[in-house]
Amino acid sequence: MKNGTPLNQSATRVMLLGSGFLGKEAIVALQRFGVETIAVDCYPQVPTHQVAHRSYVIDLTHADALRELIAQEKPHIIVPETETIATDVLIEIEQTGLAQVIPTARAVSLSINHQYLRQLATEELDLPTARYAFASSYNELQMQINRGVGYPSIVKPVMSCSSKGHSVVKGPEDVKAAWDYAMSSSGDNCRSVIVEEFIKFDYEITLLTVRAVGATGEAETFFCEPIGYLQKQGDYVESWQPQRMTPTSKHRAHELAKKLTDNLGGLGIFGVE
């Protein structure tokens, strides 16, 4: 694909769904490459609306509204920047060839659904994970913990982002509060949780994993230095790069990230935690 001239018939059009501060930086970078940019968000006057060629305010979870706007604007590329999107529409758009979703519509859909992502990692790719179970009621949650997940454990909505609705369960007295918090944080579209064994760890990392077309013309995988980060009570506190790791641990992290992102496919930057 060759970039034409913005606001011209030859333009390459990129639509960003979700328009926060990170999206604003992406829009500015795209414009430096001569790309025509379209910013869409649920709220008016968000950061990306200040710099995009065109901007819209719609409910991104409303399938018909999203489908209609995509048909109107005819973007070549769609970049989701928020998790609250009607992902079924993205899958439909990608399958019909109307636009390319970055990295892929399937990857976007999986990234917000802990159940599908965990099943992919554990059952299909055989990646090492903590013990886990799913529950659709408070009683089932208590049963799954008693059956084998144990204490301490982490309870979170099946569909959530940015640690919203997550809590640590240290004993039976915490289970009801964890269930109520997960349900109050997840919205009407999610009525189930995942409960995971709490793993004692030395540090947590995000490994930015880049899938891009290499010199051979085929998709290749590249890695940024690992980013360490600290959370307290589910809230982000700080991060740093690089996180110091042993060569063996770093190599293993690269192996796991590549196996997962190869399965997700597409091109783009993946944040593998």
Image (tube, rainbow, N blue to C red):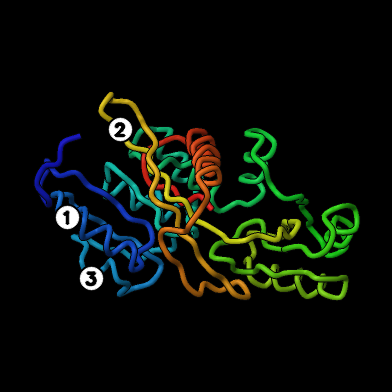
Comparing marks 1 and 3, which lies closer to the viewer?
1
Please count the marks in the image.
Answer: 3
Question: Which residue does the image show at 44% across and 59% down from the upper left?
Answer: 82
Q: Is residue 255 left or right of residue 98?
A: right
Q: Is residue 200 visible?
A: yes
Amino acid tagged 1: Gln
Q: Crowding near pointer 2: few (<14 within 10 Å), some, many (20+)?
A: few
Q: Crowding near pointer 1: few (<14 within 10 Å), some, many (20+)?
A: some
Q: Which residue is mark 3?
A: 50
Label 2 or label 1, whichever comes before in sequence order = 1
Label 1 – label 3 distance at C-alpha: 13 Å
Q: Nearer the viewer, residue 38 or 264?
A: 264
Question: Which residue does the image show at 50% across and 49% down from the upper left?
Answer: 272
Q: Are marks 3 and 2 in contact (CB under 8 Å)?
A: no
Q: Is residue 90 left or right of residue 99?
A: right
Q: Nearer the viewer, residue 199 or 61?
A: 199
Amino acid tagged 2: Val
Q: x and y percent of residue 28 in the render? A: 21, 60
Q: Which residue is mark 2?
A: 213
Q: Are marks 2 and 1 in contact (CB under 8 Å)?
A: no
Label 3 – label 2 distance at C-alpha: 31 Å
Q: x and y percent of residue 72 in the render? A: 28, 49
Q: Are marks 1 and 3 in contact (CB under 8 Å)?
A: no
**Measured along the vertical axis of the image, is residue 193 above or below residue 99?**
below
Amino acid tagged 3: Gln
SS label for mark 2: strand
Assign the N terminus to one quadrant of the image.
top left
SS label for mark 3: helix
Question: Which residue does the image show at 33% across and 48% down from the upper left?
Answer: 70
Q: Which residue is mark 1?
A: 31
Question: Which residue does the image show at 50% across and 65% down from the upper left?
Answer: 229
Q: x and y percent of residue 265 in the render? A: 45, 35
